[in-house]
Amino acid sequence: MDSLKTTISKTILFYALIFLALACEQKPSENTDTNSSLPALPTADANNGGLTLPDNFGTVVVADSTGRARHIAVNDQGDIFIKMRRLKEEKGILTISDTTGNGKMDTFSGFDLYTGTGIHIYNNYLYASSDSSVYRYPLENGAVPAEAEPEVIVSGFPIQRSHASKTLAFDNAGNIYVNVGGPSNACMEESRTPGSPGMDPCPQLEYQAGIWRFDANKPGQTQKEDGYRYATGIRNAVALEWNDKENSLYALQHGRDQLNNLFTDLYTDEQSAELPSEEFLQINEGDDFGWPYCYYDHFKNQKILAPEYGGDGEKTGRCEDIKAPIMAFPAHWAPNDLLFYTGDLFPEKYKNGAFIAFHGSWNRGPFAQKGYSVVFVPFKDGKPSGDWEIFATGFKGKDEIMSPSEAAHRPVGLAQGPDGSLYISDSVKGKIWRVMYYDNVTTASL
Amino acid sequence: MNKFYLIFISIALFIAACGGAKNEAEQTETTAQEEVKSEPEEKVAEAAVPRGQGIYKTYCQVCHQADGNGVPGMNPPLTQTEWVLGEKERLIKVVLNGLNGEIEIKGEIYNNVMASHSFLTDKQIADVLTYVRSSWGNDASEISEEEVAAVRASNEG
């Protein structure tokens, strides 16, 4: 009897162990069935790095404080290149790597000496921009060799202090697209001065406030000699991306500031906080989106004549035939990066949809500042197929802030990893999050 | 009857809202001047602060923020910086001439353009700077209308 009991007990124990082993198999840390050729997803951080995400998404904070980060790029090995707004230990571009496979970056190195925003991997080169030039570096096994010298691809962009970020996008035909922001709020004769009229025509449109196209493979180009003005009338498109599926350029424009502060008689504080829209643009060659003469009002669903050019908040005037955005977002949220998701890790609804990093507002005062989030927009046939939704929040570190310097973090850059993870960078401390989907399995954080 | 009552109330509100501010400013000014006779320095500053706060809200707050901390990378902070607490002449000139150039404060670089605010009166500039120099933990002396007038004269000359 005893031996039978022992046998039964052993059998139960055996199956229990198998059951446990199978159950363990489903834990995120060992979840390998998304893409068998890639390493397992690392276990999500207990608090998702302070972020709130949709169900079954989790994050790992891959690096906590890399410095004043801007845009990021991820290579096929999962290493991250970070373009710095301020030099970090005398380096303008950081490379961070995870050598242990736990998702935490443990190796930091850096190179070059200029600050800026744009960074992108294209045809086995790493492209990066200062506020006046675009450079590239050859990649060997995904890394920039120690002895590599940067090639200057484009130089000679106007020196400007406002809206100076030269963000980059690449098509499939060997072209690079560069954002050249307008150097002012609305091309006033006296910059940001109450009541000052707008210059007409605005001379800033000649070499700024648009998207310029260049040959991505030709060193030594200058904007004036080699640049082609692909689109104009865009105040500042920090978020700029080529959509391979649609074979088209997309961007988000930072709308103008200070309607009430500059035109007290025409706009209330409330109107100034809620207008104008941040515009999501689908850009064809030759398009003009109307800056500085027009802005978009998402309550009226119209381009409105700017007050610097005789507008009163109602008149449409010369703006009637100006191309409208494909979607409009609340005012002043500051869209700073755009990514079309092509990975397999996230659920089907995210495929080919747009993620947008909103840096967060500064000129909604006297009301609370808003934005400070990553938003998702579902896409079909090159257009939004539904409303936008908040994908990631919690960057601010508290529910309500009145001033941007209160924000613990501000999302600024997005990149997709080789396994379909979404990476988000932060401009305040340089925190980098890796967002993953855990395939209906309870994440470690839940 | 009700209609007339409503119109009366509306007109009263309009006068209160649109004319009142001016009256209030004038009254405050008068009070301040009266008090100058008995206790010169301090009382002027006390009256200047609420006046300065109103000017700050209208012309400065959108960029420099309600907490005076500015916007990282764009608009510089007004708290605990020599630009505000130090030499009065440089500070007055920033308001009169604006500032168009990169400045660095505590390791952060600020880039946005500040417009000239020379359209404000000497008194308004004195009030708003006195408010800024005594708010958010700042504790610097007041700036007088005469000091602004003197800088404006030398600035223009």
Image (cartoon, coloured by chain):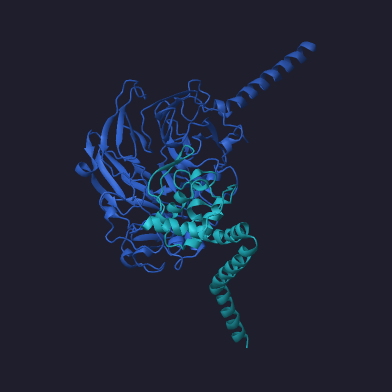
Q: Nearer the viewer, residue A171 or A154?
A: A154
**Quadrant location of the C terminus of chain A?**
top right
Residue A207 place in picture, x, y as percent: 26, 49
Question: Is A108 left, or right, of A139 in this rendering?
Answer: right
Extreme residue toward the bottom, this view: B1
Q: Nearer the viewer, residue B87 or A23?
A: B87
Question: Is A401 left, or right, of A122 in this rendering?
Answer: right
Residue B47 sits in which quadrant? bottom right
Extreme residue toward the top, this view: A3
Image vertical order of residue A22 relative to residue B65, above or below = above
Q: Is residue A117 visible?
A: yes
**Quadrant location of the N terminus of chain A?**
top right
Image vertical order of residue A1 relative to residue B62, above or below = above
Total labels: the figure holds 0
Extreme residue toward the front, this view: B37
Question: Is A303 left, or right, of A333 in this rendering?
Answer: left
| Image point (57%, 35%), residue name | A49
Residue A301 place in picture, x, y as percent: 41, 62
Residue B48 place in picture, x, y as percent: 57, 60
Chain identifier matching the cyan colour in the rendered picture:
B
Extreme residue toward the right, this view: A1
Q: Nearer the viewer, residue A217 or A115?
A: A115
Q: Nearer the viewer, residue A150 or A190?
A: A190
Image vertical order of residue A155 relative to residue A297, above or below = above
Q: Is residue A364 visible?
A: no
Chain A's colour is blue
